[in-house]
């Protein structure tokens, strides 16, 4: 499947919607086409402005989905009228749902204080017959050599089709880029807070807030100490840089 991308400050955002994302997953898994999927909004784009490596990781991704409504609006302004939000938590539920009849296997990597185990239990109840073949709760640091070997062995034994990564940006993108070649998986997908949402640890914004583009404000109100710097710094800078790109004051290349 040939999917075009929208240039958002040099980050190529895939011009897709949830149906197209599902089709891309199905084709990749059927062909055993290895790759990783970045679920990207304003935060990921802005982190990429300060780190060339992270921008390159996004642009090498199998898919870089429009996680936030600003990505969707920019895509539609760039002639991709079919483009819609492919939100990490929604993408996760949709892929888990269709995987029951297709026999896909899943692995949950990430979370803290038992989130992965809780997520596995809840998803098995929500989707009877789902194959969650493993979970792994990593430490809050890079894996050491022994832990890398252990993870590689577990994944080799279980052979998941989809390896879900519930860290945060940019940790999850860097992890996927580094470990894709080492792990016996087809697709790796970084879905950030989706683990906490679906495990029932963090409250999710109502759908109307998600669609309005104001989910960032909802999350800021629920987790102000952790998120204030991200949103109150990144969001104004993003708007300014997008205006500069839009009127041609600054050009960005997707490489």
Image (cartoon, grey):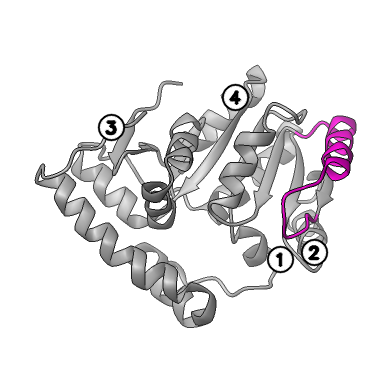
Q: Is mark 2 on a helix, strand or loop?
A: helix
**Residue 109, image x, y percentages:** 74, 49
Of the 4 image quadrants, the one containing the C terminus is top left
Q: Quarter-wise, where is residue 217 in the image? A: bottom left
Depth check: 28 or 129 in front? 28
Residue 1, placed above or below residue 96: above
Q: Which residue is pictured at 82% across the width and 40% down the height?
A: 148
Residue 213 seen by the camera: no
Q: Mark 3 points at which residue?
A: 253
Q: What element carries label 4?
A: helix
Q: Name the residue under label 1.
A: 199
Sequence-wise, the earlier of marks 1 and 3 is 1
Dot 3 alpha-carbon crowd within 10 angstroms: few under 14, some 14 to 19, many 20 or more? few
Q: Name the residue under label 2.
A: 118
Give the CA distance from mark 3 to mark 2.
Answer: 42 Å
Give the CA distance from mark 1 to mark 3.
Answer: 38 Å
Q: Name the residue under label 4.
A: 28
């Amino acid at each position: 499947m040939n999917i075009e991308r929208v240039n958002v400050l040099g980050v190529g955002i895939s011009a897709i919607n949830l149906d197209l994302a599902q089709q891309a997953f199905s084709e990749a898994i059927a062909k055993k086409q290895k790759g990783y999927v970045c679920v990207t909004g304003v935060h990921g784009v802005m982190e990429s402005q300060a780190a060339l490596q992270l921008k390159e990781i996004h642009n090498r991704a199998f898919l870089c989905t429009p996680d936030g409504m600003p990505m969707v609006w920019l895509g539609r302004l760039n002639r991709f009228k079919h483009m819609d939000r492919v939100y990490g938590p929604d993408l996760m539920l949709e892929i888990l749902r269709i995987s029951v009849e297709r026999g896909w296997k899943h692995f949950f990597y990430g979370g803290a204080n038992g989130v992965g185990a809780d997520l596995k239990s809840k998803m098995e109840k929500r989707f009877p017959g789902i194959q969650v073949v493993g979970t792994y709760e990593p430490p809050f640091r890079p894996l050491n050599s022994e832990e890398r070997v252990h993870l590689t062995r577990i994944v080799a034994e279980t052979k998941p089709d989809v390896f879900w990564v519930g860290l945060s940006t940019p940790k999850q993108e860097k992890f996927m880029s580094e470990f894709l070649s080492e792990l016996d998986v087809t697709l790796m997908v970084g879905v950030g807070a989706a683990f906490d949402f679906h495990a029932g640890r963090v409250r999710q914004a109502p759908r109307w807030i998600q669609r309005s583009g104001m989910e960032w404000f909802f999350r800021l109100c629920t987790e102000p100490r952790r998120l204030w710097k991200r949103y109150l710094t990144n969001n104004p800078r993003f708007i300014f840089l997008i205006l500069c790109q839009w009127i041609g004051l600054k050009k960005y290349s997707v490489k």
